[in-house]
Image (tube, grey):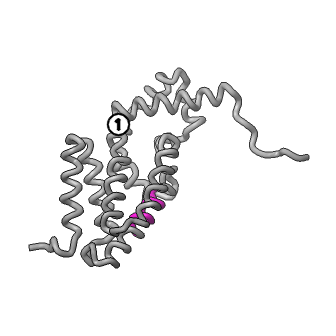
Amino acid sequence: MSGIGARRPRADAQRNHERILLAADQAFGTQGTGASLGGIARQAGVAIGTLYGHFPNRQALCAALLRERHAKLFAFGDELSRSASALDGLAGWMGAVAVHAAAYRGLAALLMDSLDDEASELHEACGRMAAITEALLIAARGAGEVRDDVTAADVHALMNAAAWMREQVQDEHAEHLLGLMVHGLRPSAGIR
């Protein structure tokens, strides 16, 4: 038999899937990633069992919402590896990840938790973010543009802090604070 493979979802199942994603995007946008899944199901006009049938947990729902954004973020990270200045590449990545992780209140923490949780639907994306961060940091350190004692864990913590700041202050102020963070990575900044 030819053509055997994954069946296309029924039209009503596909509509439910799309309505759940739309309701989740709205709920996470206003209430953060801790928004009630029951409330999301009600907003989508489906039973909670239908939501769980499509998305077995909160991480799976977030992963589906972020899939397209992750693809764009990773492409941008790959582009940054070709920056004229390795520090500019790293700074651009830190800013992009901070904006990405601030898309929903609480997302930065959810992403950080998923980095070490192989069962999480977000684990693979977090691993990819970590790999890009590591590559950009190694390049910046190799170019002498970043202090030798700066680790990838340091950069992740700074990006997480920058995402949190974006939730607290105006964008311009968040950009200024990120600039101060990046300046602190420079060898000449030194700790006095």
Seen in the image, is 105 located left or right of residue 175? right
Residue 2 within the segment the image draws in magenta: no
Q: Is residue 18 above or below residue 6?
A: above
- Residue 149 at what x, y percent from top left? 25, 76
The segment highlighted magenta reads 126-134
**Three-letter amino acid code of the residue under disc 1:** Gly
Quarter of the image for the C terminus: give it. Answer: bottom left
Near-viewer residue (192 or 108):
192
- Residue 94 at what x, y percent from top left? 32, 57
**Residue 116 in sight:** no
Q: Is residue 149 above or below residue 31?
A: below
Numbered disc 1: secondary structure: loop
Q: Is residue 170 above or below residue 48?
A: below
Residue at screen point 54% across, 27% down: 19
- Residue 142 at what x, y percent from top left? 34, 78
Residue at screen point 40% across, 51% down: 111
Mark 1, other Cα within 10 Å: few <14 / some 14–19 / many ≥20? some
Residue at screen point 55% across, 39% down: 55
Residue at the limit of the structure toward the left, as seen here: 192
Reading the image, the residue beneath label 1 is 32
